[in-house]
Each structure stands twice: as C-alpha cells, then as structure tokens.
Amino acid sequence: MIKNFIKILSLILIFIALGAGGAYLFFEKTGFGKTGEAPSVVGKSVTEASELLNKRKLSLSVKEQSYDNDIPEGHIIKQLVEPGTRLKAGSELEVIVSRGKGRGKGPAQGMFSTPSFEGQLFDEAKLTLANLEIKLGKVTWVHSDNVEKGAIVAQRPLPGSAGISEINLLVSLGPYDVFYKCPSFVNMTIDDARILAGKLGIKLIEQDEGVKVVSQKPGAGEVVRKGDPVEVTLGRGRMWF
C-alpha cells in the first residue's frame, strides 16, 4: 500500500517537473512575458530607432510630430518612456518626431524617413506601419531561396524615403517545392545513403542498427518532395558466401 502510494506520488512529481520544464521552454522560445530595458532613442532617426526596438522585440509608436530648431527632421525629439524603464516584449515606445525647423516648436503634420522593413517578418512590419500611420498598399507574395517564409524581400518606396503615406511590400513564400522520384537506398552503405540524401535534401530516418540499408519507405521511384523524410531500416545487408 505504502509502496503504491510512493510510486503514484513519484509519478505526479515527474509530471509536475515535466510541465514546469515545458512551460519554461515555451516562455524562453516565444519571449512571452519577458521584459527588457527601454533604450535611449532621442536624437536617432525613425529608421534607426525602429530597427533598435525591433531587435529588443519592442515597437515604435510616433505619438506626434513637432517643429524643432535643434533636432533634424525625421529624428526623435523626445521619448515618453524613460531609458532604462522595464518593458514587456511587444510593448510600444511612444516618441515625438522632429518636423525640422519651423515657426517655433509645436505639433505639426510632417515627414520622416521610412524605416527598412527588408528581412523583417510581415506581421511585425504591419504593426510598425500602423504605429507610423503609413498605409499598407499592394502586398505581393513571391518564392525566395534566400529570405525565410513570411519575411519581407523588398519594399517600395525604398528605405529612407520621406513623406510617404503608403508602402508596397514583396513578401517571401519561402523556396519553391522541388519534387523528384525517390532513389533506391537499399544495399547502400549508410554513409553513402547519407551523402546522397544530403545532396537531394531528403531527411533520412534511420531505424535499427547496421552498416547497410536493407529496406526503405517510401520505396524507390515514388514521388517525394525536397525536405520529406525517408525511413530506412539498417542491417548487415546481403551476404555472399
């Protein structure tokens, strides 16, 4: 009776530990709930500030634009959160942007340099555009071998353009799917099979132990896609006497 109780209690503790470990990994990977210090962005251009904040999983929000005789046009006059303040990931940092020299200081509808969105995830770029009050224009999805799926390949107008109200984006669909007939791995040494699979972009799933491939699934000649797994069973292979 006591042994059974101890066994059940041990299982409960193991499940609790696994759950805590899984939660820790989830929070570490997603950054959910993390906090970081707000950087100083005063004097920086909108482009520089936006890129700096994106690296810290924060976003820039232009609260207003104002004439200023000292701060160049498109640069930040003031930030409404003090540098060093702890912010949660995903938070906005509100700023006031210079309109350049004008008739004294005060709010004004002005222009600032467009930040670079290239390489940034589309969803993150949409949030930044909303904060900058720039309208999202035409979005074209294209395949790319160099830019990850969902990230921005190019933008028009180009980064640094001033006074834009709308922007068009080219977004990556990732690389094209490549299909071909699965080769025969049977009777190959596992080293040769690995080399061939690597060249074709096939993921080998190795079962059992041995130096040669004795069977495979899917079979030779079946259509597979680059990146698909092929399960191979290992053994000693065909023996000759």
Image (cartoon, rainbow, N blue to C red):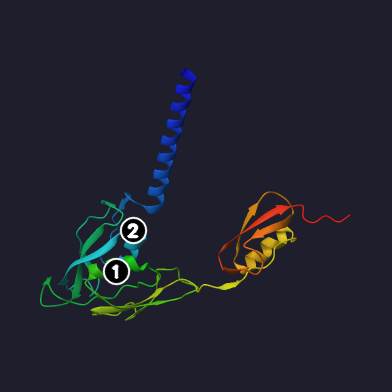
Q: Residues within 10 Å of mark 1 (few under 14, many from 20)?
A: some
**Which sits earlier in the primary sequence, circle 2 or circle 1?**
2
Q: Secondary structure at mark 2?
A: loop
Q: Can residue 44 be seen in this snapshot?
A: no
Q: Which mark is residue 126?
A: 1
The reply to whether callout 2 and callout 1 are in contact (CB within 8 Å) is no
Q: Position of residue 144 (x, y in %)?
A: 47, 75
Q: Which circle, 2 or 1, is nearer the viewer?
A: 1
Q: CA distance from mark 2 to mark 1?
A: 14 Å
Split into 4 quadrants, where in the image is the C terminus? bottom right
Amino acid type assigned to the residue bearing label 1 in the image: Lys
Q: Residues within 10 Å of mark 2 (few under 14, many from 20)?
A: some
Front in this rendered view, residue 233 or 177? 233
Front residue of this view, candidates 115 and 232: 232
The single residue placed furthest to the right in the displayed view is: 241
Q: Secondary structure at mark 1?
A: helix
154 w.r.t. 211: above or below? below
Q: Quadrant of residue 170?
A: bottom left
- Image spot of residue 123 (x, y percent): 33, 66
Q: Which residue is mark 2?
A: 57
